[in-house]
Image (cartoon, helix red, strand yellow):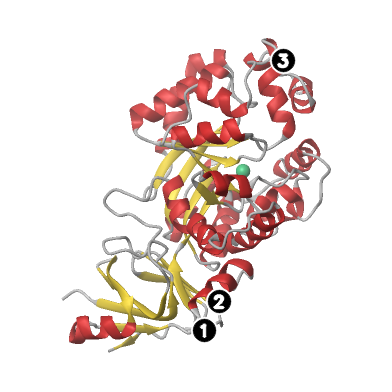
Amino acid sequence: MSTLTLHRARTVFPVSAPPIADGAVAVQDGRIVAVGTHDDLTVALADAVTHRYEWDGVLSPGLVNAHTHLQYTDMAAVGRGTYPSFETWALAFEKSYRTPHDWAASAAEGARLSIEAGTTSVAEIVTDPEAGAAVHDAGLHGVVFWEVFGWKRAAWADRGPSTVLAQLAALPTPPATGLSPHALYSLDTDVFRSLQQLAEQHGVRLHIHAAESASEDEFARFGTGALADRWRGLGHSDLQLLSGNGSGLGVVQYLDEVGVLTPHSHLAHGIYVDADDRALLRARGVSVALCPRSNSVIGLDAPPVAAYLRERNPLAVGTDSLSSSPSLRVLDDVAELHRLARDQGYADTDLHARLLHAATAGGARALGLHHGGSPTGTLTVGARADLAIFDVAAPAPGDALAELVESSPTALATVVGGSPLWTAEPANGAVR
Ligand SMILES: [Zn+2]
């Protein structure tokens, strides 16, 4: 007989529906089978319930970290610095990256920290194969992206697709796997076009760093600026964008021109974008994972979160890695986005709800996990039971939502596919 588990919490945030005071979620075979008040579910399910959890906190869909590199968890010393520019951060990053690392252990530690922060799905970018198993081994959901970096067209034409497809195939599943063309400045234009075709042929998603630094725009447009100078200095003057004096297009338009802006891709950062760029992203159905604390460490501007919200772009939240961020806690970035949105003049009363949506349903959408056979990101009947419980004291649902979004509460438990993956204290899952 399959078990029927009831999770009761002070407030339940379905995200797809209004908050529920003294709410409950019923789970069977890894799926949500009912969401409602504790009283209603107790009546409806009566004696069918076999296990109960009484959580002293609030319950939401598990968080989705829509941009991270768990591999770099042991590079936290780089992330503790402050940098005047993207280029100076990149130098510090590369110096640390070239020293010996146990990437498998580093990524595993990142997965552990993620789970203990209420994260149930990640968009994880893997640069070295040793780091490729961490998400699978930890039992997290999400998409593991193989990073494609530093290919130019001649080498790519010779052996690129077969090399990258073998690297992709080496990643253990589940979860789903995908390809991450690193950024427009580290890959030739022909390589981007080819990667889009490969992704389409093999049915995998793409995830790209985009509009992260101001100098990236100048690189794309004219093949000039600080980033272009740096790449020329590294011996890459033959990159198509550099040898051809740029594309004449800004970052978002360039990515559209090479064909990678589709509902099967999402971008990280999206800082240096204008209204036309945001409109193009909406038209293409492309989500942006905002990583405001990473942007701040690297000395970049804040993402235009208020404009994205007002214009209704699909949004997600990422922590980026510890090499550029103080923690892997998605709620820390949610709190930062709340501060930024208010600073940027976003005054609507829906801000808390919209940011919780971005960190859950928005993240699931960014990763393509919001539909199909086992959707996640909301607490709806039929969705996968990916849940997070947080230590929020406010009794009224509205106050509890504000506390959740603004004050980055600690997680009490993380449930993936109906199974508690981690609990802060020994689980109180009493058999009925
Ligand atoms: Zn990144």
| Residue on which the image places disc 3 | 237
Q: What element carries label 1?
A: loop
Q: Relative to 422, is 87 on the left or the right?
A: right
Where 423 falls versus 102 (above or below)?
Answer: below
> Residue 91 occupies which quadrant of the picture?
top right
Q: Residue 129: where, in percent of width, then height?
A: 52, 42
| Residue on which the image places disc 1 | 395
Q: Disc count in the image? A: 3
Q: Relative to 57, is 16 on the left or the right?
A: left
Q: Which amino acid does label 3 sit on?
A: Ser
Q: What element carries label 3?
A: loop
Q: Which amino acid does label 2 sit on?
A: Asp
Residue 377 shows up from this direction:
yes
Q: Is mark 2 on a helix, strand or loop?
A: helix
Q: Relative to 9, is 128 on the left or the right?
A: right
Q: Residue 364: where, in percent of width, then height?
A: 43, 52
Where 161 falls versus 367 (above or below)?
Answer: above
**Viewport quadrant of the C terminus:** bottom left
Q: Nearer the viewer, mark 2 or mark 3?
A: 2
Where 39 falls versus 386 (above or below)?
Answer: below
Query: Closest to the observer: 123 or 380?
Result: 380
Asked whether the beta carbons under mark 2 and mark 3 sit within 8 Å of each other, the answer is no
Q: Relative to 356, is 41 on the left or the right?
A: left
Give the numbered dot on residue 399.
2
**Residue under the point 62% across and 27% down:** 251
**Residue under the point 59% across and 24% down:** 187
